[in-house]
Amino acid sequence: MLAASAWPSAAHRTEGGLAVRDFKSARAPEPNQKWLRLRVKLLAFFFVALLLAAFGRAVQLQVFERDKLRGLAQDQYVRQIEIPARRGDIFDRRGTPFAQSVEVDSIWVDPSMLPDVKQAARSLAKVLKLDVEDLQARLGRAKRFAWVKRQVTPRDVEAVKALGLPGFGFTKEPKRFYPQKELGAHVVGMVGLDGHGLEGLELAFEDELSGQNSRLSGFRDAKGRKLLVSGAPDTIERQGAAVTLTIDRHLQFVAERALSRAVEEAKAVAGMAILLEPKTGEILAIANHPRFNPNAPEKEARASMRNRAALDTFEPGSTMKAFVVASALDQKVIKTEDLFFCENGAWTVGRHTIHDTHPLGWLTPQLVLRESSNICSSKIAQQLGRERLVKAYRDFGFGERTGLALPGEGRGSIPFPKAEVSLATQSFGQGMTTTAVQMAAAWGALANGGLLMRPYLVSKVVDPDGVVLLENRPTEVRQAVSPATAKKIVSMLESVVTKEGTAPKAAMEDYRVAGKTGTAQKADPVARGYSDKRLASFVGVVPAENPRAVILVIVDEPKTDVYGGNVAAPAFKEIATAAMAHLAVPPSREVPLPPTALPVAAAQPPPSKVETARPMVSEAVTENVEPGSVRVPDVVGQAGREAVTKLLSSALEPRLLGSGRVVSQTPAAGALVEKGARVTLELAARQ
């Protein structure tokens, strides 16, 4: 029973086995299989999402942030240095270089690669002779690039390499070089350390001369080791245009030498000289003194770099008389045989008195120019009239810029002379202003048959490919006076350089010369009047019968002698002698005519002898003070006792406030007051 009950029969086992199998196949899946499938789906979704995120990030980096990331990458291994283009050359009319560019080394550094910036700055400053603090500050501010020193010598390069410091680079860049040094420096100008023009034609033609800048790239690995450095691009491809001047180097040298000698001998403060071709308007030389060397501008005074001849305006003085007489003759206001009474040296106009340097009687227009009479020039201007005088000056180019292409060129001014005394003073070049270039061009009109030509300095500008970017040609401006009148005036002006004239020192043996002297009072902007300083000048035309050159010489504030015939005329002769030889001008065939005799009533000692004997020229214009009136003297800066004495001697009552030296006065110096008026002086002790 036990066996039977414990072990069922085979049939039962078979049926039971089938029942068991049927039971297994019919029962539900276990829960683990469900979670397995869910995990597979979740894992697949995760990988798909990750792939989409990676793809989206790739799109963002490769498309939207491409430029930013490229810049960051290049900043790690690429160094780019902007290299200025090689500036175009500047030549004189015969091809002699006045300005050129040469390739020199410049030193830069990656400050992030220096182990010790302060120590490196000290070492560099010592070998390169730089300021330690400035260099250290520059290296400290920069991140990956800083200039150490630009445009250095080969010795400096070797000294820096010998230090063995990492992160340094050396590149070539152009440096401006002026082979003629001081010669023509005021015209050519100069450039700064960055290669941009600062003065003169270098500034005026900056765009044409500068060319196209380029960049030099250098590559480094992660440790900062140099792998590859691209060479500098072809300098011809980035070179600026060449500028050719009308200046002649030889004549420029002669003009500067003669001007410097005249200024130094006269112990003057400055000077100007211009040599102009009257038929074309070309400026063959334009000189200034003092001079400067553009190769080392840091050693020069700023004032010495100014091109006074083109930029500065001044009251020209008696050289303007030629235009007054020319316009009066041209408009038939006067005739060549007319006589004018010069009042024996003093002529009252309103509250003022016009003076001549010496007494003169009756003079013809020619003798007015020869004797340089202020009074008779004023009388001719009266007959010409205010409107026609101003128009005559403007017809000769005064009061308008000549268009020299130099930045800051002066315009000058021709104020309308409302008062009678203004009309008188403008007739002999006071109360108006001009530039030296304007004066030379106006005299060029007289020498060119009355036709005013536009003066110019630059003949052409040509780019490296040979394309002409700019070309100046002789340009007519206007007919100032008729050819007959111009020829007549030039003939009259020949008498100025005779022994009886004011400039015998300008006469030449082989050439006929026509010219005019000028001795102008300089305005005092503080006192609002004229000072005792003078501007001595001479302008001449040579040869007079067929002018080839107009030469103007101006000496500013001469000390030894103030007359243009003595100070400026010798320099004119020196320049003219060299110019005639250099230009191969044949000597004058005609002998200069003898000077016209003075009328008996006007016979005087030769002006040249009178001028030589007199140490100082008299005031051309003085104001007539009414009886009972007196001018307040200038006592500022004087001690109290000295000021009181000076005021009492002028019949004025002093009133003192404080002690020490006079720091201010009321009324101001030069004021016209009644005698016995009170003058209040404020005094203060020196600190």
Image (cartoon, rainbow, N blue to C red):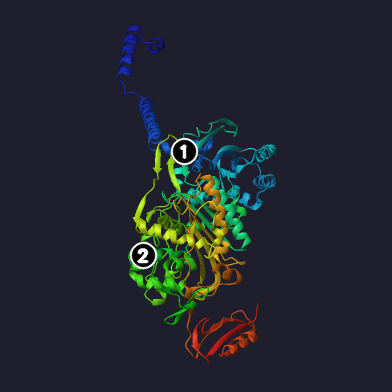
Please name whichever residue, 236 or 137, is drawn nearer the observer in this view of the structure.
236
Q: Which disc number belongs to residue 71?
A: 1
Q: CA distance from mark 2 to mark 1?
A: 77 Å
Residue 47 against residue 263 in the figure, above or below:
above
Residue kind at label 1, given as amino acid type: Gly
Q: Quadrant of the C terminus?
A: bottom right
| x and y, in percent, of residue 158 in the image | 67, 37
In which image quadrant can residue 224 be found?
top right
Residue kind at label 2, given as amino acid type: Leu
| x and y, in percent, of residue 315 in the image | 47, 66
> Does 269 sit left or right of 529 as displayed?
right
Please name whichever residue, 262 or 232, is drawn nearer the observer in this view of the structure.
262
Q: SS at mark 2?
A: helix
Please name whichever residue, 444 or 589, is drawn nearer the observer in this view of the structure.
589
Residue 177 against residue 428 in the figure, above or below:
above
Within-10-Å neighbours for mark 2: few <14, some 14–19, many 20+: many
Q: SS at mark 1?
A: helix
- Earlier along the polypeptide chain: callout 2 or callout 1? 1
The residue at the point 56 percent across, 46 percent down is 142
The residue that disc 2 covers is: 329
Please name whichever residue, 648 or 174, is drawn nearer the observer in this view of the structure.
648
Within-10-Å neighbours for mark 1: few <14, some 14–19, many 20+: few
